[in-house]
């Protein structure tokens, strides 16, 4: 065997790997199907693959990830970051999140955690099989006169479904306290009945990280429509024209990051 012999392998490159790519990265939005997002490993985790969905290099003011945590994986020791907030939402499997000197909770699918800046915590695999967790990091913007939020460990089933729009076929679950000025971002589960779109194309200063959880539809970004389904990710920068038109037979749902409650730094 020469040193250039290829190792034996049975996998084959799928047809259409180039021509059927759905991914698009533009100046103020990106459409990111999961298959193109390669593996990263991060020093605070063991036996964990991180797929980095958006980051400042793309134009986002935050970072968002899917963590694939193998059995025995996660944070081997407590982790904390000055001035940085963390949010986790469990997509599959089970993890245990422990706040140093505070609550420890096992989180299954739909479980979530908010950790204010500077909190020391561990996120570890629990149960059996791989755990997939959506993770988000954002630099905290303090608001004069308001205190820092407390950690939150909870589950989406404990969050009421509301609808401030009054529009038939819409549902909202605000995972973080809505309108609470201590928080500088929202994480919202956005529910849609088939065929129910927004009342208008939105164009707003806030940016979004969107992770598709259920159903399918067409997403307008700028001037282009993209077909979206579960596990796709979208980054929308400020003033990116946006609209969603659900096309599936069942309900559609995505988890939406939105920076809110702060004035514009000038
Ligand atoms: O609240 C929002 O900004 C939301 N309607 N945007 C979105 O789902 N793209
Ligand atoms: Mn929006």
Image (cartoon, helix red, strand yellow):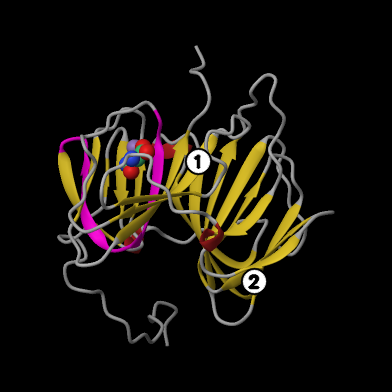
Mark 2 closeness class: few <14, some 14–19, many ≥20 residues within 10 Å:
many
Q: Is residue 265 above or below residue 246?
A: above
User: Closer to the observer: label 1 or label 2?
Assistant: 1
- To which residue does mark 2 refer? 125
Q: Which mark is residue 186?
A: 1
Q: Magenta region: which residues? A: 206-223
Queried whether the magenta region covers residue 210, the answer comes back as yes
Q: Is residue 75 above or below residue 201?
A: below
Q: How many marks?
A: 2
Determine which quarter of the picture holds residue 257: top left
Q: Earlier in the sequence, mark 1 or mark 2?
A: 2
The residue shown at (36%, 33%) is 237
Q: Residues within 10 Å of mark 1 (few under 14, many from 20)?
A: many
Please tell me in which quarter of the rendered image ligand 2 is found. Answer: top left
**x and y percentages locating residue 117 in the rendered image:** 69, 39
Residue 203 placement (x, y as % from top left): 28, 29
In the image shown, does 132 or 162 lie closer to the viewer? 162
| Residue 243 position within the rendered picture, expressed as x and y whole percent measured from the top left | 23, 41
Instruction: Label 1, secondary structure: give it.
Output: strand
**Element assignment for label 2:** strand
């Amino acid at each position: 065997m020469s040193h250039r012999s290829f190792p034996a392998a049975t996998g084959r490159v799928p047809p259409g790997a180039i021509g059927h790519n759905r991914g698009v990265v533009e100046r103020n939005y990106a459409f990111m199907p999961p298959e193109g997002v390669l593996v990263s490993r991060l020093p605070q985790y063991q036996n964990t693959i991180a797929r980095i969905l958006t980051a400042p290099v793309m134009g986002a003011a935050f970072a968002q990830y899917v963590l694939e945590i193998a059995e025995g994986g996660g944070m081997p020791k407590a982790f904390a970051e000055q001035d940085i907030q963390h949010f986790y939402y469990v997509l599959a499997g089970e993890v245990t999140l422990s706040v140093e000197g505070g609550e420890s909770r096992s989180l299954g699918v739909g479980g979530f955690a908010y950790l204010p800046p500077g909190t020391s915590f561990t996120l570890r695999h629990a149960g059996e099989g791989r755990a997939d967790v959506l993770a988000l990091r954002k630099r905290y913007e303090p608001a004069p006169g308001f205190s820092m939020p407390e950690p939150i460990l909870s589950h989406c089933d404990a969050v009421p479904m509301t609808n401030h729009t009054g529009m038939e076929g819409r549902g909202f679950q605000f995972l973080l306290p809505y309108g609470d000025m201590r928080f500088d971002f929202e994480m919202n589960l956005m529910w849609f009945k088939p065929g129910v779109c927004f009342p208008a194309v939105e164009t707003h200063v806030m940016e979004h990280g969107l992770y598709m959880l259920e159903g399918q539809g067409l997403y307008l970004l700028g001037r282009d429509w993209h077909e979206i389904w579960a596990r796709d990710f979208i980054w929308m920068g400020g003033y990116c024209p946006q609209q969603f038109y659900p096309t599936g037979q069942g309900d559609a749902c995505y988890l939406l990051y939105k920076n809110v409650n702060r004035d514009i730094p000038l």
